[in-house]
Amino acid sequence: MNWQVYIILCSDDSLYTGITNDVVRRFNQHADRQGAKYFRGRRPKQLVYVETGHDRSSAGKREVAIKKLPRLEKLQLLASDSNKVGNFSL
């Protein structure tokens, strides 16, 4: 399967990082407060980053690596060439 790593900008301006094999479905689940407990106290505002071309294992490893980045480096990632967010419409 083709897995993606994604980042969502939240209502409190925090950045949530996750993985999925269907970004649109997963964003909608977060919006409906299904799944991640992170969204119990905040709402997803916008999908701001998608990285494609992963299998389940590499997506999980990349998610962990991104979560360890400082906020400034995450924001730089959003502007990078690896961001494929334009290929997905919610």
Image (tube, rainbow, N blue to C red):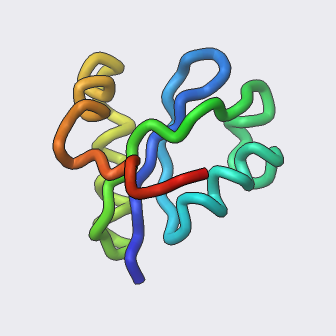
Q: Percent from the top left, x then y, of residue 26?
A: 63, 58
Q: Residue at x 75, y 43 (%)?
A: 31
- Of all residues, the one furthest to the bottom in this rendering is 1
How many marks the image carries: the answer is: 0
Q: Residue at x 64, y 51 (%)?
A: 27
Q: Percent from the top left, x then y, of residue 6?
A: 44, 49
76 or 85: nearer the eye? Answer: 85
63 or 53: nearer the eye? Answer: 53
Please state, as top left, top right, bottom left or bottom right, where the N terminus lies in the image. Answer: bottom left
* Image height of 60 relative to 27, above or below: below
Q: Percent from the top left, x then y, of residue 30?
A: 71, 47
Q: Quadrant of residue 41?
A: top right
* Image height of 79 relative to 37, above or below: above
Q: Quadrant of residue 76?
A: top left
Q: Percent from the top left, x then y, of residue 62?
A: 30, 53
Left or right of 16 on screen, residue 76 = left
